[in-house]
Amino acid sequence: MQFTSVSFLLFAAVILLGYYALPKKARWCWLLAGSMFFYLMAGVEYLAFILLTAVSTYFAGLLMDKNLSKQEAYLAENKQILSREEKKEYKARIKSKNRIIMIVCLVINFAVLGLCKFLLVEPFSTMAQGTTLSFLTLGLPLGISFYMFQSMGYVVDIYRTTDKAEKNPLKLLLFVSYFPQLMQGPISRHADLAPQLVEGKAFDGKEFSFGLQRMLWGFFKKMVIADRIAAAVIALRGPQFTGVGFFLLTLFYAVQIYADFTGGIDMTIGLSQALGIKLEENFVRPFFSKNIAEYWRRWHITLGEWMKSYIFYPISVSQPMLKLSKKARSSMGNFGKRLPVYVASIATWLVTGIWHGITPNFILWGMMNCFVIVVSEELNPLYEKFHNRFGWKEKKWYGAFEILRMFLLMNLIRIVDLFPNVADYFRRMGSLVTTFNFQILWDGTLMKLGLSALDYGIILGGIVLMFCVSLYQEKKGSVREVLWNKPVLRYILVFVLLVIVLLMGSYGIGYNASDFIYNQF
């Protein structure tokens, strides 16, 4: 049941009506029932996967919490007779037990995730044909990468004692399966999201209106822009499009994936806001970034935060890394001091690439991002000398240049998504300087990509509108807050946007839009 389908709109309307019609204490049960129904619509065979994560997470959390409670009670009861060393030793034993529980839970769940991803590629896909796992060769279980990371973060937080275990298994199941997040996140922390899911807030007209407005904005980006430009992206992937054709592919794909992913996130956050539930922002105008490090602080923010909290920081401050830093510092100077950070960065980006897919292109994508960030960090002193020498950094035009540079560089890295055969990707990259093919800009080729002149006009208008809204948000803040105090203008703009989506949306069979790009991850 796609977010952009008629069936989902009816489903969301029923959820909203039922949620506010029920007493506050019963609303979380309604959300759980809706989440289970939503998941079952994706396929009954996939239900076992989300239940395995929920059950293993529940018992792992419960066991670790029980050990911690036992530790607290024991230390309180014997605080007068235990020495400092004995207390320390007892805590270490409890922590060791909890570490084993945590590791077992992580291994079980990530092994399942790995199995699902491996069965999507050859030769494992062919080997699975005719077996009970053959249905997994058609696609990943709905939302598995998102709910898996969210749930494992919860387990690690209990181990770290930064969160408490949920005693009610159904409430934890709701946290794992909350349906708006299943498509493409954002990835939330249990301590932030779970209390909101079970609280049942009073109806707030402003928040409800803001939520529906954001959903409509998401529909516009997804159906009017992303789904329309998708035809040209598919066509431009053909081997005949080199040079300028490949460059156009990088531009078109940047528009498609941005409108598709942010559109879906707008729908998720908007629906949750209408329910009185605040989810973390996942995008903060990433194309206004001036370097790739900043870009990744603005794009898919919750995945980046998850990677930093559970991969990067544990590796960079681990005992082996501290020992490596100490040894490397004497022979490599400042670089040796930063070496653990770079090792942790490589590991983090490797995991991030594998999260997107286990084919070589996604691993290359992760390593390319890592390489640019690390090299930029090493060259930062030279950048500072350059800026101090010429003073360009204070100029407005130089800021625009940095944004354009980042945009083009990220496009060249991002486009590797579309080339499982990395050799083909490098051949296309090389064609940028060997085979220009400028003639496709005026010989009619652009009109043979599945788009008409009207389609190009709609896409261009949509891009201009997205840019203007983003620029206003970057400079002044929320557009919805401004329009809230101008109800007549607000109603007119909402009506116009609704008409645009209805008349200009790119629809498939049964008036349903195409799948979201990030569903494949």
Image: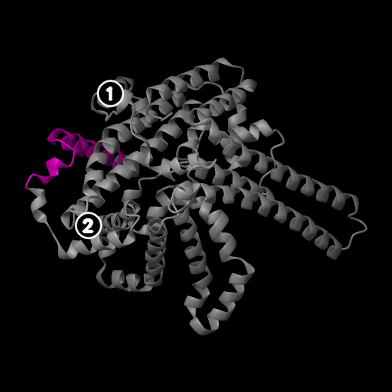
What mark, if any, has residue 65 been given in the picture?
A: none
Q: Identify residue for label 1.
A: 502
Q: Residue 220 at what x, y percent from top left?
A: 30, 31
Q: For the residue marked with disc 1, what is the amino acid?
A: Leu
Q: Nearer the viewer, residue 382 or 135?
A: 135
Measured from the top left, where is residue 292 in percent x and y? 36, 58
Q: In the drawing, does residue 282 fall left or right of residue 246?
A: right
> Left or right of 222: which side holds 18?
right
Which residue appears at 37% of the width and 57% of the height?
Answer: 361
Q: As displayed, is residue 398 above or below residue 137?
A: below
Q: Is residue 215 above or below residue 113?
A: above
Q: Main secondary structure of the magenta part?
A: helix
Up/down of 386 relative to 401, above or below: below
Toward the front, the furthest residue is 130
Q: Which residue extends farthest bottom?
A: 331
Q: Nearer the viewer, residue 125 or 413?
A: 125
In terms of depth relative to the viewer, which is nearer, 116 or 220? 116
Tell me what residue is drawn at x 11 percent, y 46 percent: 445
Residue 320, by quadrant, is bottom right
Q: Secondary structure at mark 2?
A: helix
Whether residue 347 appears in magenta in the rendering, the answer is no
Q: Is residue 187 visible?
A: no
Query: Do we see residue 196 in this rendering?
Result: yes
Magenta-span inclusion, residue 448: yes
Magenta region: 443-471
* Residue 397: mark: 2
How packed mark 2 is, by other alpha carbons closer than 10 Å (few <14, some 14-19, many 20 or more), is few
Distance of label 1 from label 2 (alpha carbons) = 39 Å
Judged left or right of residue 185, residue 452 is: left
Q: Looking at numbered disc 2 in the image, what kind of residue is underneath it?
A: Trp
